[in-house]
Image (cartoon, grey):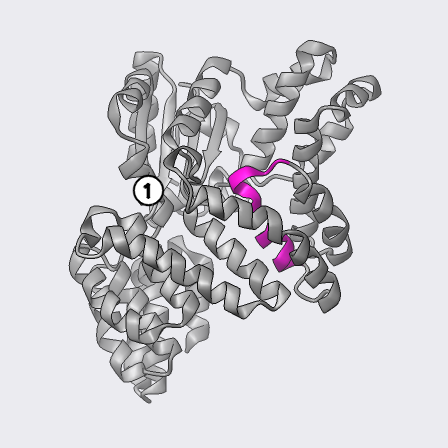
Amino acid sequence: MRRILFALSLLFAFSAADAAADKPDTPTIDAALKTAVERRAPVLVDFHAPWCYSCYFMAKHVLVGPEWEKIEHKTVVVELDADSPEGAYWKTLWGVKALPSYVILKPDGAELGRILAEQTQPQFLAQVNDILKRSSTLDDLKAAAAKGGAAGLKPTREALAVYRARYDESGLAWYATLPPEARKQYDADAQVALLLERLRLLQASKANDVAACEAIAPKVFAGDLGCERPYEIDRWSACTAKSAPETRKALFTSQLAPMKKLVDTGVFGTKATACADKRSAVLGLADVYEGVGDDKAREALLRKAVAQVSKGASGHLADDRNAADNWRVYLEALQDNAALDTLYPKLIAAYPDDYVYAFRYGRNLLARGEAQKALPYLEQASEKAYGQNRLKVAEQRVKALKVLNREAEARSVVAEALKANGPWFPEDAAHLKAAL
């Protein structure tokens, strides 16, 4: 096993089986922590990937300008591609579940906090600065919360927020260990109460506990979720897929008004009220319309969203990849194949240096039953694919080759991809093998 920084090996303990396995070199994190120790500065790790539309939003609209430059001066900023072996290693070790994610560490490697998903620049900078001021790890926050009193409320909120940012429902078990008097005080706080309900919904969804998801969701949806409401609707919807149709329809109906308001203000409203993640808001409302059986309203919403993004992106696809990709996703939600056949070649031309749009178009064509047309695009994507995404591209190539009865070529594709990237991504390797 190659060298790992001692501080991190203490903080992020892993099993003997993991320790015995090969691990990629970690020059990016190693160098960042060495610099952090020299500068006595925290490290801000930016997890991203070439397919991550939210990452492009952050890069273009948030991680820029004089206020961001102040953060860069105060921290050691390091970018990690989650599809690379190194990025995937730290993503797994730190339990990063979504992209983009920003993990902030003390110079010794102890985690101070993390931030998830698209944010507006004011929201993001406020969260970063708050984490940098705290200089407290999760253990510090938990110790302060246990003391109770007025001073314990803020660290309790922060500790629960850290658990939620980690998608770690064990925050519920920790909270239950607090002194009863402290919990009685904190339970009365609206922020604490909502964080607890969101952790309970997370726990229920992970356990596929349909009854619990049905019971908890109304409490979550009654809270002030802001632009994160679509995420919780999606979590509840996935958990209750097998619930009685009338039960699901009733809850979808309850979310019509708040989701319409969110989209009207956060997507089609003024810049001051806009959600950073417009796509999730639009798709969330589209799911609500589908859940209540209003197909006309769903289509009208998606057409309006297409009109909005195409107005700014048409002829300028390379200027804002987030907007360009939203255009693609809305058309796919509409299953507007004619429009996709026009847009996809333009996206491939606008972003020629990576595999993403050739892969997405090939996958889209394959799903339509057009394997012969899909294969050249998947082969084009394979020339630029690497790491985890190389295995995903290979899986689609294999599916196309099998449809075309080219079994020997499919086996060759699998063998080549597994040899190059299989050891670092066992789950994707298993999917690729299964494709044969």
Q: Name the quadrant of the C terminus.
A: bottom left
Q: Is residue 204 left or right of residue 234?
A: right
Q: Residue, x 60% and y 46% (percent of image)?
A: 258
Is residue 230 among what the camera can see?
Answer: no
Q: Is residue 434 left or right of residue 369?
A: right
Q: Which residue is mark 1?
A: 57
For badge 1, the amino acid type reads: Phe
Q: Nearer the viewer, residue 398 or 195?
A: 195
Q: Is residue 296 above or below residue 22?
A: below
Give the farthest residue toward the bottom.
Answer: 405
Residue 337 highlighted magenta (yes or no)? no
Is residue 48 among what the camera can see?
Answer: yes
Q: Is residue 399 above or below residue 387?
A: below
Q: Name the quadrant of the N terminus.
A: top left
- Residue 48 picture location, percent across and down: 35, 43
Magenta extent = 224-239
Q: Is residue 410 left or right of residue 334?
A: left
Quadrant in which residue 270 is drawn: top left
- Residue 47 picture location, percent across and down: 37, 39
- Residue 31 picture location, percent across and down: 29, 27
- The chief SS type of the magenta part is helix
Q: Residue, x 31% and y 82% (percent of image)?
A: 371
